[in-house]
Image (cartoon, helix red, strand yellow):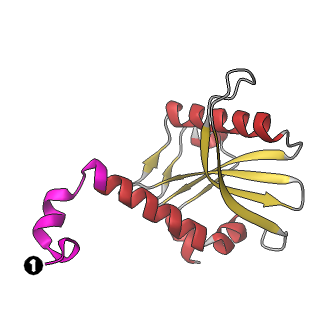
Amino acid sequence: MANKSSDPHFWMHSAGTPKINTWKGLAFERVCLLHSEQIRRKLGIAGVLTETYSWRCKADEETGISGSQIDLLICRKDRVINICEIKYSDGPYSMTKAVYNDVLNKINDFRLSTGTKYALFPTLITSSEVKKNAYSEKMQACIDGDDLFL
């Protein structure tokens, strides 16, 4: 019996399905975690001591926390945290109002949950180039897949 992952028919019929798209997104997040040095270099903070991790919190009506998951946090010794939204895209990525508002919600949840006094910088990391628009321009930084392999 052939392994599904090596079967060309499996991939032809699975391309574009939610299951495969989720897998691509998770795989790209892992690539980003493994290339945090290149991300830091692109952000111009290669010499700054940092810690990187993902983060999540549950909803809490009393405190106004809606519940969030942050793909990548870069916690910097210079009292800045890059809140990284990682998006996989097969082609140029266009940030939407909904995604931007989701990032703002994550920043709010993070601030409320942790009580941090650090500056929080919204950062977009995509597998493809970022199409410039009103929402991508509001991000502190945009990093694309090519930047991960410099």
User: Which residue is disc 1 drawn over?
Assistant: 1
Give yes or no for residue 48 being in the magenta stretch.
no
Q: Quadrant of the N terminus?
A: bottom left
The part of the image, by quadrant, that contains residue 108 is: top right
Residue in view at x 61 percent, y 34 percent: 67
Depth order, front residue of 21/3: 3
Residue in view at x 83 percent, y 60 percent: 76
- Total number of numbered discs in the rendering: 1
Looking at the magenta stretch, what is its main secondary structure? helix
Under mark 1, the amino acid is: Met
Give yes or no for residue 13 being in the magenta stretch.
yes
x, y percentage for residue 79?
A: 89, 54
- Range of magenta residues: 1-19
The part of the image, by quadrant, that contains residue 147 is: bottom right
> In this rendering, is residue 25 above or below 41?
above
Residue in view at x 73 percent, y 59 percent: 74
Q: Is residue 23 left or right of residue 8?
A: right
Extreme residue in the top direction: 62
> In this rendering, is residue 6 above or below 104?
below
* Residue density around tag 1, few if under 14, some if 14–19, many if 20 or more, within 10 Å: few
Depth order, front residue of 47/60: 60
Residue in view at x 41 percent, y 53 percent: 92
Mark 1 residue element: loop
The answer to whether residue 11 of the structure is visible from this angle is yes
The answer to whether residue 134 of the structure is visible from this angle is no
x, y percentage for residue 59?
A: 63, 31
x, y percentage for residue 5?
A: 23, 72
